[in-house]
Amino acid sequence: MSIAVSLVGSDDRDFVAKLRERGFRAASVALSELEAAHPMGSKGPDAFVFDVRGLSRLPREIGQAKRQFPSAGIVIVAKALDPTEMLEAMRMGVNEWVAEPLQIAEVDAAIHRVARVTARPMMGKTIAVLGAKGGVGSTSVAVNLATALRAASGQPTLLMDLHLAHGDAAVFFGVDPHISVLDAIENIHRLDETYFKGLVTTTKAGPDLLGSSNRPLQGGVEAMRVRSLIEFAATAYRYVVLDCPRSDATMIEAIDAASTVVVVANQELATLRSASRIANDLRMRCGADRVKLALSRFDPLSDIRQADVERVLGGPVKYVFPSDYRTAVAALNRGEPLVVEPRSRLAESFEEFARDVAGLPARPKETAKAGLFGLLGGRR
């Protein structure tokens, strides 16, 4: 199928005809008519080409188009290579910049570069995991979920550590990546399958890892860039697991792209108070059907029962992981997800969690330990 291109704001009457000669499904749209031509909720083109040669500054419609159609690539056609304007354009989500003297072959190549990234359908399932409070084990949940998904499905799986600096997912896998998620975000305009594969680290446990950076973060990052990274990853992997910081508003906004959001809490009052706020905020943002609740280090003898947790959090606890401190610490010290050695109830609970999240069939009954879910259910 040919690439759909919207040529915006061009006074060059031959421009759209030249694009059509190149095989594009091209349409010319005036800047003032952009919203009417591509209303909210419509599919949108595979790529926008903004012709700014007759303008004194970049139009705000560029940013609006990127926000409304985040999967569409954007090409700027300008009089010159202006570093200041190019930086501004990059912040607005522009992927390519073509300057005069204009060669239609250059525009053709630029469109194909951005459309190759953005026009591919999202095939993967994205699961975001975030803790209601520090220390609840959300990174362990994310790492073991990714590992169990890879083992159960045999499909390409990625763990993306969205703690942009000094995250711990790499420690759980026993690797030391030299390229990070921050590098990917900073070079989002270069993103294609070959470049992306050079960013990730393959782990012995099975999943690929796009790890956190060891360098301090200078300033913030744009949620649109993070969301674009997540959406691209879902075109390359069947399963993408996101280890998310709970206190970063940019990341919370970016995980709108996730299929499922898992909030991890435990049986502590301070954690449950935070979990209640986070879960309610996410239900409003993502929809209640996409937000799932999980309890880590579950103690069936705790004074705070599962029914109490569900009452405080305003919904059912979908997943429960039993407390097993020694097994968890031993796996961490080995640099190996604990599901690699599936001999504990905790490992088994992660495996069942992964199968449920992915919609995979449960393991055959003869291989499952009897009474597991009776134990996990706890007393109510």
Image (cartoon, rainbow, N blue to C red):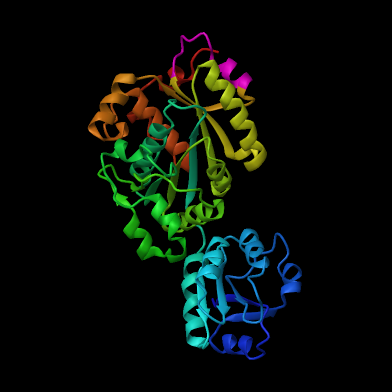
Q: Is residue 309 magenta?
A: yes
Name the residue rendered at 54%, 46% in the picture: 258
- Camera sees residue 111: no
Q: Is residue 109 magenta?
A: no
Q: How many marks?
A: 0
Between 49 and 334, which is closer to the camera in this rendering? 49
Between 85 and 1, which is closer to the camera in this rendering? 85
Between 220 and 172, which is closer to the camera in this rendering? 220
* Bounds of the magenta segment: 298-312
Q: Position of residue 136 (x, y in %)?
A: 44, 25
Q: Position of residue 208 (x, y in %)?
A: 33, 49
Task: Name the image quarter holding residue 331.
Answer: top left
Q: Position of residue 254 (x, y in %)?
A: 55, 48
Which residue sits furthest left?
Answer: 334
In which quadrant of the rendered image does the C terminus lie?
top right
In the rendered image, the vertical position of residue 26 relative to residue 183, given as above or below: below
Task: Name the image quarter holding residue 8.
Answer: bottom right
Is 172 displayed left or right of 308 in the figure?
A: left
Q: Position of residue 377 (x, y in %)?
A: 49, 19
Name the residue rendered at 53%, 53% in the picture: 227
In which quadrant of the rendered image does the N terminus lie?
bottom right
In the rendered image, the vertical position of residue 109 relative to residue 134, given as above or below: below
Name the residue rendered at 52%, 65% in the picture: 87
- Camera sees residue 178: yes
In the rendered image, the vertical position of residue 21 relative to residue 284, given as above or below: below
Name the residue rendered at 46%, 9% in the picture: 301
